[in-house]
Image (cartoon, helix red, strand yellow):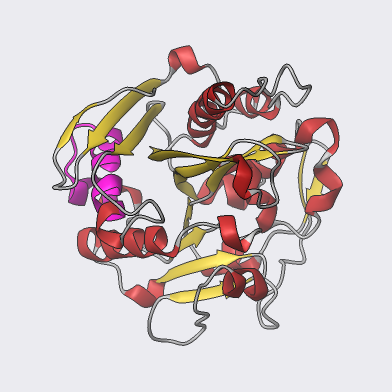
Amino acid sequence: MYIVIMSRVAVVKYFGDFLGEKFSVSVYENMIKAGIGFVAGNLSLNEYFKQLFPGGAVGIKTNCLTPFNATPLNLTEAFVNILRENAGYDENDLIIWERTNHELKKAGYTLNAASTGVRCLGTDVATIGYDRTFLNSGKVNSMVSKILTRMIEHNVNIPILKDHSIAGMSAGLKNMYGAIHNPNKYHDNNCSPYAANINNLTPIRDKHRLTIIDAVKVQYDNGPGYAPHSIDSYNSLIISEDPVAADCVALEILNRIRARNGKKSLKELGREVKYLDEAEKLGLGQANIAKIEIGVLAIAEDGSISEGKLF
């Protein structure tokens, strides 16, 4: 298990020119490198990645529930490029994964289960499926994807930030519902404490290395299904080793975006994200935003970095 030493979260905001549709691979690469630079502290990018990924396959968990508001292909490609260049990874040791092949395909990903190239596949592939051993944490009793239990040594969670009609927010912790066989059982009480317990299942907890939340276009209401009239631009990535701290900062951003669009906070609507406190009690990370070191970085088109503000 990788030990989180400090709850440090980078919010990287892009201020360069773009067409307003999506960021390029190179823009995402600059944003990730800037964010990792803050999270890594005194370590160089290469030193940090060698410490975080000392060997073994790396999984990249996407959120492809809704194809028009899924983890961007350019973001995963940017992270793959960085892992290859800065950690020396062979591309076939990198696995982009999701619950189903169908979800990946609908989001635009090219499936690949071959022995060459970056692998991209869903747990529903006939030769994969879920590990038959039930794992427990609190009231959660679930089988976990074999991609996580058997095929990878490290997992990087790359969800998108959006409103969720039941959980309140869908970001990092909620995205790992896609790793278990029975996610529909765990949505009562705004997914609390279930989202915390799911992330406390041994392979999910022990193989987590990094959370990178895409907050470029944030669906601030009417989620989790795609609702184009409820999307606002924030043009940022949220990056942290601490999965709870990353979600805590994401929640702050989501509520502020809701406010500037005339919406009540999730707490006022009875959709308070309570599972973050439960996750902290389980030792998964820091849920008190006052105790999180937040670095807001403004990055320009040429890659230059300056100090930024959340809003």
> Which contiguous range is marked in magenta?
28-49
Q: Is residue 56 left or right of residue 152?
A: left
Residue at x 81%, y 48% (from the top left corner) = 141
Q: Is residue 137 left or right of residue 308?
A: right
Confirm whether residue 161 shows in the render. Answer: yes
Residue 168: image location, x then y, percent: 70, 32
Residue at x 58%, y 70% (from the top left corner) = 104
Q: Is residue 288 left or right of residue 303?
A: right
Which of the 4 quarters of the picture holds residue 9? top left
Q: Nearer the viewer, residue 194 or 139?
A: 194
Confirm whether residue 63 shows in the render. Answer: no
Q: Is residue 13 magenta?
A: no
Which of the 4 quarters of the picture holds residue 79? bottom left
Which of the 4 quarters of the picture holds residue 262? top right
Q: Nearer the viewer, residue 162 or 36?
A: 162
Q: Quadrant of the C terminus?
A: top left
**Residue 277 in the image: above or below residue 211:** above
Residue at x 48%, y 51% (from the top left corner) = 158
Q: Nearer the viewer, residue 143 or 60?
A: 60
